[in-house]
Image (cartoon, grey):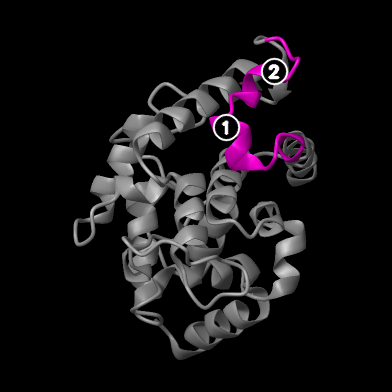
Amino acid sequence: MKQEIILELINSANRCECADFIEGDPVQFPHRYSDRKDIEVSAFISAWMAYGSRKVFLGVLDRLHRMMDLAGGPYRFIVSGAWKETGQGADVCLYRFYKWADFGLLCERLVNVYSRLDSLEDLFVPGEPLEKGVLTLCREFDGVNGIPVPGSTSANKRLYMFLRWMVRKGSPVDFGIWTRVTPAQLLVPVDTHVYATAKSLGLTSRCSADLKTSIEITGKMAQIWPDDPARGDFALYGSQVM
């Protein structure tokens, strides 16, 4: 990697990874809470919803969180069964390709996990490859619209963004409340913008934004941040080199 590209990525990460980033990002919603379980549930639902028009999905997430707060917060909303009483028909559109039935199934699977485990983190085994934990997580939510099928070769952008939020430490944006996964294991969440930026910088030669592309880009970011390659997400998001 050329030195000027490295410097641009470092400068870009420094510009973007700040408290001001939170307001316009779905990570703003888990930042409303201090309880670990509320943070985790809010983050998982917020990441699940984060596609398409940012303005629109942030509005939908705001309404969902207001609903959850009336039940005592995101975690209480899930485990108390309050999600069954939204007053919305199953086939009513929630957002784009999501219906209220999809949200209900997501909540049902969360109930199933929390009836057995203290945290979604418990699906990950320390020291095992990250992909094994991701596979287990996807199996828990198999059939839920918006969750990749187990073993998918897609980039899983929203899932890896959720993991970034939970795992990275010492960040004004990410929470770092999980310990079973290390920051060094994370992949850079790849969407269309991140892929286009990485492609323009010569960080990937692949022709689509799939899981292999995410792995390739993460390898390049690890040359700069070997213990924290997912910081490259901020670097590529804010890069002014296109």
- Residue drawn where x is 31% and y is 45% of the image: 123
| x and y percentages locating residue 42 in the rendered image | 61, 46
| Viewer-side residue, 134 vs 1 | 134
Instruction: Give the number of callouts.
Output: 2
Q: Disc 1 on helix, strand or loop?
A: helix
Whether residue 128 is visible to the viewer of this picture, yes or no, is yes
Dividing the picture into quadrants, the one containing residue 28 is: bottom right
Do residues under tags 1 and 2 come within 8 Å of each other at their CB atoms? no
Give whichever of discs 1 and 2 has the lower sequence position. 1
**Residue 78, numbered circle:** 1
Q: Is residue 156 left or right of residue 73?
A: left
Query: Would you place residue 107 above or below residue 69 in this image?
Result: above
Please, what secondary structure does the residue beneath circle 2 have? helix
Which picture quadrant has residue 238?
A: bottom right
Tell me which amino acid carries mark 1.
Answer: Ile
What residue does disc 2 label? 85
The span picked out in magenta is 68-89
Could you tell me the amino acid type at mark 2?
A: Glu
Identified at 71% across, 9% down, the residue is 89
Does the segment drawn in magenta span residue 71? yes
* Other residues around mark 2 within 10 Å, as few (<14) / some (14–19) / many (≥20): few
